C-alpha cells in the first residue's frame, strides 16, 4: 500500500501549480518543492516509473543538450518525462512529474544541477549519465571547479551505468578512468579553434597536477591536451568535424567508429553548441535512434527558453541569450562578434541566490570583444548589479558614449533599448533575469503584433 504522504504531496503540488497558472506564472520549481517537502521519497517514485533514466550534468549546456535529446527521442516514443525548462534540482524534477504524471515512462531525461547530483542519484539510478563540462560557476555556492568535480567523481564508481563524457575537457575525461562503461565525444579542430589561450580556467592535469600542454583550444580549457604523465584526450567514440557556418546555421559531419552522418545542419551557432550537439547525438546513437530521425530532428530543432531565442519587433530582431559565468559569457560575446549588423546590447546582471551573490566573475569574461565590435551602437546595463556591469565594460575600453545605465527594472530597460535604431538587439541576462526578460519580450511581441508592428 502506497504511503498516504504520496497522495498528499501530489494534491499539494497540483494545487500550487493551479494557483500559479491562474496568476500567469510558470510552475517550474515551487510545486515540486512543496511536494518533496511533504513526501521526500517522491523522486524514488519517478525512478520506479521510468524504464530507463538519463541524467545530464555539468556546468554549461545541460538545458540545451537535454532539449536536443528530447526533440530527437520523442520521434521514437511519446512516453517521456523531462525537466525541459532548466529547473534542475530535486524540486524541478518533482514539478516535471506533477505536470506529466503517468503510470509508466519509456524514458526519463533529467538535467541535473551539478551540486545536486549526489543527492539525486540516491533516488534516481541512471542508465546513462551525460557530462558536458566543468567551469567556474557560482563560486559562493560551488567553490572552485575541483570542489564541484569531486562531488560527482565520488559517485562515478557507485553507478552501474554508461557514462557519456566530453573527451576535450580534462576534468570530465578523467572520469573514464573510474567508470567501467564510458563513451567519449568531442569536437575536432575547426575554423574556430585557436592556439591562443583566451580564458583557460585550468592548465593543470587532474591526475598528477602537472601543467597540461595544448595543441589547440576550442574554447575555455576544451581542446586537444596532453600531460607528461600520459593523461590526454581519450580516443573519440563519437565526434563532430568539418564545421562550417552558413546563414546563421552550423553545418558539420558526425562520426562514430562505424558510421558517419554527413552534412548535418543545426540552426544555432556558437562552438559551445557543437559540443551540445555532440553530447546529444552520442547518447542518441548509443540508445539506437534512427540516423534519419536524428538528421531531421537536428535540422528542425527550435529552442524557446532564452538560448539564442529570436523575437521580432518591426524591422529589428531581438535575440535572448543566457550567460551565467565567465566562459559562457565570453562565448556569447565571441558569437556576437561574427554578426556584422548594427547592434545594441542589454546586459542584465543579478546577484540573487540562484545567480550567486559573488559577481566578481564578470571581470574574468573577455569584454575586450565588445571594444573590437565595429557595429556596436549602444550597451545598456541593468539588473540588481547593473552598476557593476557598467563599470566592468568601461574598463574594457568601451566608449562612455555607448554605455547606457538604466534602472534595475527589466521592463523599463527593454522598453528603452527597443527604441534603438539598429538591425539586431542582443539581451544577455543572468539566470534569475532570464524568465522575467522572456515574459516581457513575449508581452511586447503580442502588443506589437496587435498594433501591426
Image (cartoon, grey):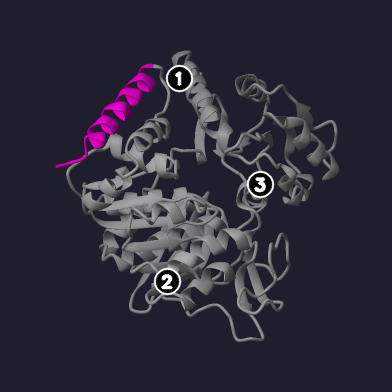
Front label number (1 vs 2): 2
Query: Could you tell whether 208 is left or right of 176 in the image?
Result: right
> Which element type, helix, strand or loop, lies under badge 1?
helix
Residue marked by disc 2 = 157
Which numbered mark, 3 or 1, is in the foreground of this view? Answer: 3
Which residue position is annotated with label 1? 446
Instruction: Please tell me whether residue 327 is drawn above or below residue 234 in the rendered image.
Output: above
Q: CA distance from mark 3 to mark 2?
A: 28 Å
Ranked by sequence position, the earlier of labels 3 and 1 is 3
- Asked whether residue 240 appears in the rendered view, the answer is no
Is label 2 in a helix, a strand or a loop? loop
Q: In terms of secondary structure, where does tag 3 sit?
A: helix
Which of the 4 image quadrants contains residue 209? bottom right
Which of the two discs, 3 and 2, labels the residue nearer the N terminus? 3
Magenta stretch contains residue 219: no
Residue 26 visible somewhere in the drawing: yes
Residue 3, quarter of the rendered image? top left
Residue at image position (25%, 63%) is 290
What x and y, as percent, mark residue 280?
40, 59
Left or right: 191 with respect to 378?
left
Q: In this figure, which residue is indicated by the disc labeled 3?
A: 140
Question: Could you say which is closer to the camera, residue 402 or residue 395?
Answer: 395
Residue 420 placement (x, y as % from top left): 68, 25
Can you give x and y, in whole percent of width and height, for residue 154 in the image?
A: 49, 66
Label 3–label 1 contact, CB within 8 A:
no
Q: Residue at x 47, y 75 (%)?
A: 176
Q: Is residue 13 magenta?
A: yes
Neighbour tally class for label 2: few under 14, some 14-19, many 20 plus, Cα within 10 Å: some
Q: Residue furthest left?
A: 1
Q: Report the Cα–Cα distance between label 3 and label 1.
A: 39 Å
Q: Residues within 10 Å of mark 1 (few under 14, many from 20)?
A: some
Amino acid at each position: 500500500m502506497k504511503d498516504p504522504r504520496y497522495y498528499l504531496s501530489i494534491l499539494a503540488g497540483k494545487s500550487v501549480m493551479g494557483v500559479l497558472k491562474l496568476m500567469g506564472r510558470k510552475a517550474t520549481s515551487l510545486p515540486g518543492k512543496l511536494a518533496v517537502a511533504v513526501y521526500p521519497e517522491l523522486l524514488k517514485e519517478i525512478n520506479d516509473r521510468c524504464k530507463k533514466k538519463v541524467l545530464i550534468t555539468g556546468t554549461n549546456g545541460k538545458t540545451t543538450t537535454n532539449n536536443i535529446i528530447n526533440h530527437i527521442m520523442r520521434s521514437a516514443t511519446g512516453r517521456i518525462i523531462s525537466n525541459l525548462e532548466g529547473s534542475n534540482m530535486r524540486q524541478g524534477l518533482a514539478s516535471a512529474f506533477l505536470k506529466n504524471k503517468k503510470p509508466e515512462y519509456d524514458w526519463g531525461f533529467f538535467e541535473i544541477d551539478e551540486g545536486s547530483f549526489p543527492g539525486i542519484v540516491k533516488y534516481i539510478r541512471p542508465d546513462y549519465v551525460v557530462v558536458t563540462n566543468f567551469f567556474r560557476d557560482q563560486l559562493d555556492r560551488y567553490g572552485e571547479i575541483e570542489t564541484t568535480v569531486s562531488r560527482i567523481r565520488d559517485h562515478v564508481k557507485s553507478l552501474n551505468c554508461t557514462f557519456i563524457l566530453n573527451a576535450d575537457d580534462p576534468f570530465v575525461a578523467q572520469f573514464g578512468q573510474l567508470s567501467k562503461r564510458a563513451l567519449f565525444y568531442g569536437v575536432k579542430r575547426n575554423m574556430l579553434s585557436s592556439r591562443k589561450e583566451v580564458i583557460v580556467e585550468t592548465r593543470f592535469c587532474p591526475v598528477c597536477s602537472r601543467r597540461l600542454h595544448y595543441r589547440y583550444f576550442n574554447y575555455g580549457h576544451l581542446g586537444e591536451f596532453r600531460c607528461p604523465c600520459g593523461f590526454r584526450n581519450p580516443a573519440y567514440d563519437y565526434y563532430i568535424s568539418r564545421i562550417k557556418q552558413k546563414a546563421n546555421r552550423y553545418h558539420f559531419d558526425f562520426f562514430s567508429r562505424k558510421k558517419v552522418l554527413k552534412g548535418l545542419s543545426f540552426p544555432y551557432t556558437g562552438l559551445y553548441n557543437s559540443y551540445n550537439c555532440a553530447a546529444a547525438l552520442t547518447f542518441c546513437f548509443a540508445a539506437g535512434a534512427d540516423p534519419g530521425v536524428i538528421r531531421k530532428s537536428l535540422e528542425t530543432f527550435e529552442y524557446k527558453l532564452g538560448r539564442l531565442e529570436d523575437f521580432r519587433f518591426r524591422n529589428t530582431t531581438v535575440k535572448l541569450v543566457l550567460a551565467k559565468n565567465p566562459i559562457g559569457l565570453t562565448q556569447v560575446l565571441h558569437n556576437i562578434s561574427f554578426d556584422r549588423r548594427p547592434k545594441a546590447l542589454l546586459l542584465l546582471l543579478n546577484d540573487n541566490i540562484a545567480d550567486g551573490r559573488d559577481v566578481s566573475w564578470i571581470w574574468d569574461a573577455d569584454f575586450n570583444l565588445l571594444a573590437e565590435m565595429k557595429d556596436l551602437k549602444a550597451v545598456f546595463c541593468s539588473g540588481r548589479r547593473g552598476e557593476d556591469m557598467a563599470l566592468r565594460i568601461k574598463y574594457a575600453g568601451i566608449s562612455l558614449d555607448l554605455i547606457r545605465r538604466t534602472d534595475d527594472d527589466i521592463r523599463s530597460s527593454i522598453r528603452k533599448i527597443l527604441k534603438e535604431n539598429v538591425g539586431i538587439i542582443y539581451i544577455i541576462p543572468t539566470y534569475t533575469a532570464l524568465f522575467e526578460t522572456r515574459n516581457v519580450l513575449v508581452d511586447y511581441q503580442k502588443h506589437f503584433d496587435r498594433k501591426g508592428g
